Structure formats: C-alpha cells, structure tokens
Image (tube, grey):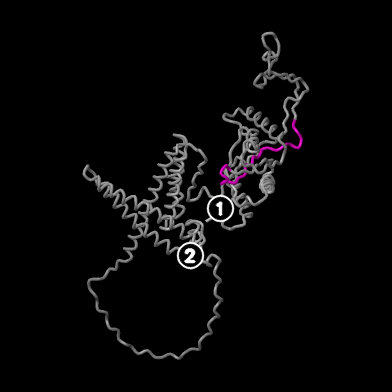
Amino acid sequence: MPRNSFVQMSKLHNVRGRIYYISSNKKQENLYAVYETTDRKFWTELAKCNQAEFKKSGTEGKCIEAREIIIALPESFVDYSPDGLLKYMTDKFKNRYGVDCIAALHHNKRKTNYHIHLIFAERNYLDEPIEKIATRNMFYDEKGNHVRTKKEILDENGHIRKRCKVIKKGEVYERQIFTIKDKRFKQENFLDEVKEYYTDLMNGLVKDEKEKLAVFKRGDVYLATKKIGKNNPKEQAIKNSNDMVKAWNKTVDQALVTGITREEIITVKKEQVVDKVQQSIKERGHDRTFLFMILFNAVEFLEKLIREFILKLELRKEKKDVVVFSDHIQEQPVKKETFVPKRVAEPKEEKPAIPPRPKAPASLLKWNQMLEANDRLKKQNQAIFKVESDRNDVYMELAKCTGIFKAGKRKKLQEEYDNLTEKVDNMKSRLKKIVQEYGYKTVDEFYRLYNNASSDYYD
C-alpha cells in the first residue's frame, strides 16, 4: 500500500533568520543544495514591507513575512542530482503560483528523512514603484508614527529627539514596491492543493511503483496520525493519541464491512471527534490527554453503532425465516374436465432478431474478484463480532467480580479480557490486508468501487 505524502506549511515571522538557518552549512549537518529564484535583497525588502503593512493595519499578533513548505521525498530520490532535483521542484512551484522562492535540500541527522524546505513570498515586485510625495513637512516620532507638529518631536532644548525624523515638502515619504498579498495562500484548501500537486510530481519521478505516494483526505472517514519529531516533550501523549487514531481507522473498516454508510461514519466523525476536539481546544488549549479521551469515546460510540446494526440485521433475517402454517388444511375441490374444441393453428409470426449482448462497463471487469473479496470481508467481520461478544461477556463477569477474596479470579478475567482485546485488534487489521491482496488501498476505497460496480451489474 502506498504511504501518505507529507507536505507541511508554516508561517514565518522572521524570514531572513529562517533563510539563514535552512541554507547555512553551519546550521545544517546534511545540506545538499540551495536554490534561489531571486537575490537575498528581495527578502530583506519583503520583510520591511510586511512589517510596515502589519503595523499600519493595527492587527494584533505577529507579522507573517513569508511562508514555508516542507516536502518529504521518497528515499530513492537520493539517486537524482541534488541541484537538479531541487531546481525542478522549486521552479514548478514558482511557475504554478508566480512567486519567488528559496529552497534547500536536507537530510535529518540520522539520514532517514530526505526533504525540501521551500520558502515562498506572498507578494511580488510591482512593475513600477508607487511613490507618495509630501505636500508639506511631515514629522515622525521614535516609533515611526506620524505626528502633526514639529513640537511633538522636540526635546526640552528644542532639538529633534533621536530616532525622530522630518520629511521635507517635495520628498518621498512612502514608497511601495510590492503588490498586495496573494489571497490564495490564505485559503483553507491551498495546502491540500499543494499536497496533490507535489504528490503527482513525485509519483512521476519514482522508479518503483511501490514507492508511489497517496494524499490523505482530511474530510474522509479516516483520521491521520501525527508525526512525532525528535526530542518532542509530548512524545508519549502523541503516541497514545496516535494509537487511538489507528483504533478508530480499524473500527471504520469494520463499520464499512458491516454495511454502515460512509456518510453515517463521516457524521459520527464530525459529531464525536471534530466538534468535540474544537470545543476542547477552545476550553483547554491543545491538551493531548483530552484528545485521547475524545478518540477513545468515539471508538466506543462507533463500536456500539456496529453492534446495534448487526443485531438489527439478525432480527430482520429471523423474521424472513419465520414460516406461518395454517391450523386447518382445506380440501381443494376437484376440477371437472370440460370439452374444448381444438382451434386451427394460425401461421406463426417470425420472432424479431435478438439484439447483441450488452457490453459490460469497465467497472465490472473485476466483478468476480470483488464478490470474492466482499465474501471474505463479511466472514472476517462475523468472526470479529463473535470474539467481541465473548469479550463483552468477560467484561460483564469482570464487573460483577468484586470483593477481597476474588482477586485471583479478577486477575484471570482481566488477562482473558486483554487477550481478547488484542485478538479483536489483530482481526480488524486483517480487514485492510484482505482488500490490499486484491489491489485496493483501503476498505473505504474497495467499497466505493464495489458499490458502483454493484449498481452497474444490476443495471
């Protein structure tokens, strides 16, 4: 199965400092190449422009001087020329979005993560600078604020205070050399678009099909795990929440096989995960302890939904199997034979020609394989449900097992419960492996194609 591509974007509040960090051999142990589409002076002027505009706007927070994208590359890309690879990936961005960039190609210290840092501007140079000329003397205080009179920038002795300035009539008091910020880079779907674009680019360069990447879709039924950086103080908390994310994804597979629609699953995901996480962040900030509990409860909610769905299916099946017999069997009257005169056979009309057999749509080329895969998934799901039922029985017995003298029995029941939980987890993992044996990435992908093919088959 292809792994998901990793493309991350961040806002830069000190673009010149960041450029020095990613492009300096003193700061980077494994720096292979640096590529720039413009000179360094551009970034200094860009930073000044953004700071001036930010100050003028009166907005709270920090000024965004530029943005940075980190692109993780397949390890086989080390076989390409570093300079050529970096130039190719950077020029593609510049040509697509029309902004200047500076990029660096790195390995991490352990040489397990080959990646590109790409810094891009949100503004371009104007074709012609816009200059504003002072129509009278203009006065600015130490903070750069415009004041009305000269008296406001004088000291006790009548001299102009340090860092205050006077712009005389006829001089340029404001010079604009950049365009306004491109709004595309603020849009919510911009990063998704970049991920799609670079994933396609990288897939076009890989030599082995197994190295091809996929894009994780945020609005889908599954959840994404979070990458754990080196020396991250929240490593254990992130690992715990990642484990619950995996549990959610496996339970989603089980829900899809059971017959719960992806629309229902997305609704559960929104109500039980997305909305609750947003509320938790508002109230408590980014605390991963609460994220773990939210995910834990969401998995339990989805498992309950699956159990209820299976029980409903079993009840329907039982109703269909019930046959009602009448208490009395009535004798059927014997029909008397009556004489019917024979008719003279009329000449037969010629039957119309049978039209050619319809050509099956492309979606049905693997129909028999799909039926086989679906049958295996259903059988695996029935086995999971049986083990889950056994686990629930053990849980109920464990809950009732209280008292000082039942410690040994409780320990035995707890071990049995833990073993069954591990078994269920492994059996759920098997659902994904089954569809991968038939060439599908996920259970969700399989059922989307299966449902389309099923519709075409019955048509």
Please say if 100 is above or below 326.
above
- Frontmost of labels 1 and 2 is 1
> Residue 246 versus residue 27: which sits nearer the camera?
27
**Number of residues whose C-alpha sits closer than 10 Å to that of mark 1, classed few (under 14), some (14–19) or many (20 or more):** some
Task: Give the residues in magenta.
Answer: 108-130
To which residue does mark 2 refer? 370
Identified by mark 1, the residue type is Ala
Q: Is residue 119 left or right of residue 253?
A: right
Residue 170 image point, x, y percent? 78, 22
Outermost residue toward the left in this view: 405
Residue 416 image point, x, y percent? 31, 51
* Residue at (71% x, 41% y) in the render: 37
* Residue at (69% x, 32% y) in the render: 44
Which quadrant of the structure image shows residue 378?
Answer: bottom left
* Residue at (39% x, 62% y) in the render: 379
Distance from disc 1 to disc 2, alpha carbons, whole Å, reads: 22 Å
Q: Earlier in the sequence, mark 1 or mark 2?
A: 1
Residue 341 image point, x, y percent? 39, 91
Identified by mark 2, the residue type is Met
Q: Is residue 366 left or right of residue 326?
A: right
Q: Is residue 135 left or right of residue 440?
A: right
To which residue does mark 1 refer? 214
Please say if 144 is above or below 202.
above
Give the structural element (helix, strand or loop) at label 1.
loop
Outermost residue toward the right in this view: 170
Please say if 380 is above or below 21.
below
Indicate whether residue 203 is drawn in magenta. no
> Residue 197 versus residue 219: which sits nearer the camera?
197
